[in-house]
Structures are given as structure tokens and as C-alpha cells.
Image: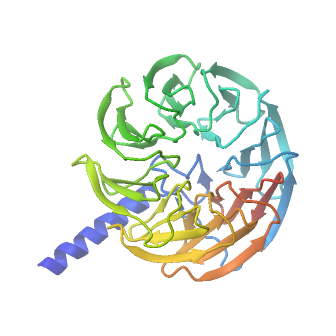
Amino acid sequence: MRVLTILSLVLCLAISAMAQNAPANNWFQFRGNHQLTGVSQSNVPATLKPLWTYEAGESIESSAAIVGGTVFVGSQKGELVALSLDNGSVYWKYSTGSPIGESSPAYSGGVVYIGDLGGWINALNASDGKKLWAFKTGGEIKSSPVVVGDRVLIGSYDEHLYCLSARNGSLLWKFKTNGPVHSTPGIADGMAFIAGCDEVFRAIRISDGKEVFNVSSGAYTGASPALLGGSAFYGTFDNEVLGVNLAERNISWRYEHPQRKFPFYSSAAVTSTRIVLGGRDKMIHALTLAGKAAWTFTTRARVESSPAIAGGRVYVGSNDGRFYVLGLSNGAKLWEFNAGAPLSASPAIANGRIVIGSQDGRLYCFG
């Protein structure tokens, strides 16, 4: 009976994970889906090669969105660009008037949304790049927008999480925290979950902006929470990775590398068997869902890129200028590409292709 119970649990987790994965042909937003799991159902070729590059002119720290055959990506030049996934040709460019930092575009219903360092959240027609509306917050935006039905959620460095009308950008509510909202909200059960710079993990009801509960992380957090199986997973600047039980509203486990004490800035990718994230200790860490070490892989510089997973492989950039492909089960290196400049953006995966930007302004497509 115990074996059957364990098998049933594993099956439920696997089904839950599949339901939350990004579909094969789309990567709508930062981390691919509302739960920020960073996992795609796309079939990526076992042997990769560079297919095309695009020169943005300034650093790309924004992670791409891919919808059908179109790639959307922002740059420090202050441009949101729409390109062909097939060959990298430009469909349109939109100038935001301020640099785009780590805020990554989100697509929903023919509209693409992006935040910029001037504090604006911009809504554009995805087909031609024409501005539909813009809303000004009181601080720079590094959080990525998340669209839930007719609402857009996004954090600002003015210490608020905002909820706007997707139709016209009007303010529906804003929630005050005690520090910059760097985190992109993860969405589950009608709530937005943010891991905060104020050292607090919060659950905020999307319907009215009321806090449902909070948990003290005990440390500054720059990562966004990945949600799976009733838990949230994220790293902190106190060198730990936390597992939060959302039903019991407490921290169920903490992981810290036994020797290397460095912050975690990268957001985790999560499957039914592994939690994978980069560390400022130059390593990529893989844990079990119980918070136990599974493997590590050492790069040559800090890893701030958030890994993406597809088909049993981990895809991640490093500030050493290399793009790595690792085995999910054991961390074995399967392939690497030397971009020659730090890769702090995160990979987007769709239609068998992977897109990632570099700090020298190049956008790469592999397939």
C-alpha cells in the first residue's frame, strides 16, 4: 500500500507538472508560464547549432517571449523588438523612452506588455507594435508582467505590486510592501505570490489585492518563486534555497551548500523530480523536491540566468559567456556555446528553438 501511495503521489506530481509546463509552440512570459516553472513541452533537437543572431545595439538582460513564429525581446537601448523566430528578421521595433532591464515581455490576446527602467508598463499591439496604453509607477521596473484574465500584474521598485486593467491600463489595486518588488509574481489558486526584497514571501489575492498570508524568508530575495505541487521554491541572498508549503504557510525546508556560501539570484526551474537554479558561486545547483542536493555543475563565473528545462535537459547561461546544456538527471555537460559576453538573461523555448540574449547586445537562436 505504501508503494502504491508513493507511486500515486509521483503520478499526481507528474500530471500537475505537465499541466503547468509551457506549451510546445509558445513561451508567453518570463519563465514560460504563470507558475514560473521554466519548463517547456517543446521538442528541442538533441544536437544544437546557432541558427541566427540579432544585434540589438545594447545589452539584453530581458528574457524573450515566443508566440508562434514571433520573438519579443527588450534591450537596454529602450526598444522592444518583434522578430521572426525562423530567421531573426525584424517585424517591428517600439521605443519605450527608457532602457529595458530585466523586465521580460508577456503576451496575451494579441497584446504584448513590458516594463522599463523609467517605471512605465507599456501595452503594445503585438502585430504592429503600436502603443495601446502605458501606466507610470513610482520606480524602475525590473519585474516582468503577468497577465491573468483581464488583469496585468507587475512589481515596481516603488515598493508596490500593481494590478492593472489589461484593456486600458487603469489601476485596479496596488499592494504596498516594505521594499522594491523585483520579483515576478507566480500565479496559483487565484493568488499572486512574490518573494520580496523586504525578506517576506507574500500571497496576495488577485481579485482585490488583499494579503492572504505571508512567510518570513529571513533574507533579501531577488529571485521569483517557482510554484509546483502546493509549494513555492526560491533562492535568497542569505545563500539558501527555500521550499515553502503553501497550504501550511510555512517554510518546509532550507538548502545551503555545505562549503560555498554565495547568494542565489537566479530563479528556479522545477519539474516533478528536480529544482534547478544558478548561484553566484559559479555553480548550477539541482535539488530534489525535498530540498536535498542532487548535483552541481561548475561554470567559470556567477550564474544569474534562470535555467529552462525541456526534454530532460537543462538550458542555462552563465556570466562566463557560455550557454550550457546539461542532463537534468545528473548534471552532465552535453553541449556548450561560447557567446563571448555574459549571459544573464534566461532562455525561452518554443517550436524546438531556444532564444537567449547576451550583455553585448546579441540575441541568439539555437535549434
* Residue 151 visible from this viewpoint: yes
Question: Can you name the residue that lies furthest to the left here?
Answer: 1
Identify whether 331 is placed above or below 50: below
Please tell me whether residue 125 is drawn above or below residue 356 in the rendered image.
above
Residue 189 image point, x, y percent: 33, 41
- Please give left or right for residue 17 compared with residue 223 in the image: left
Residue 324 lies, in percent from the top left, at 67, 72
Q: Nearer the viewer, residue 320 or 42?
A: 320
**Which quarter shows the C terminus?**
bottom right
Q: How many marks?
A: 0
Quarter of the figure with residue 131? top right
Q: Residue at x 66, y 21 (%)?
A: 134
Q: Residue at x 58, y 83 (%)?
A: 332
Tell me if I can see residue 48 in this picture: no
Looking at the picture, tell me which residue is in the foreground, 285 or 17.
285
Q: Quadrant of the N terminus?
A: bottom left
Which residue reaches farthest top?
170
* Residue 280 placement (x, y as % from top left): 59, 61
- Where does the image place residue 180, in percent across and percent down from the top left? 53, 33
Quarter holding residue 73: top right
How was the colour assigned to the protein in this rendering? rainbow
Residue for point 41% across, 74% down: 293
Q: Does 204 appear above or below 88? A: above
Pick whichever, 110 or 224, lies toward us.
224
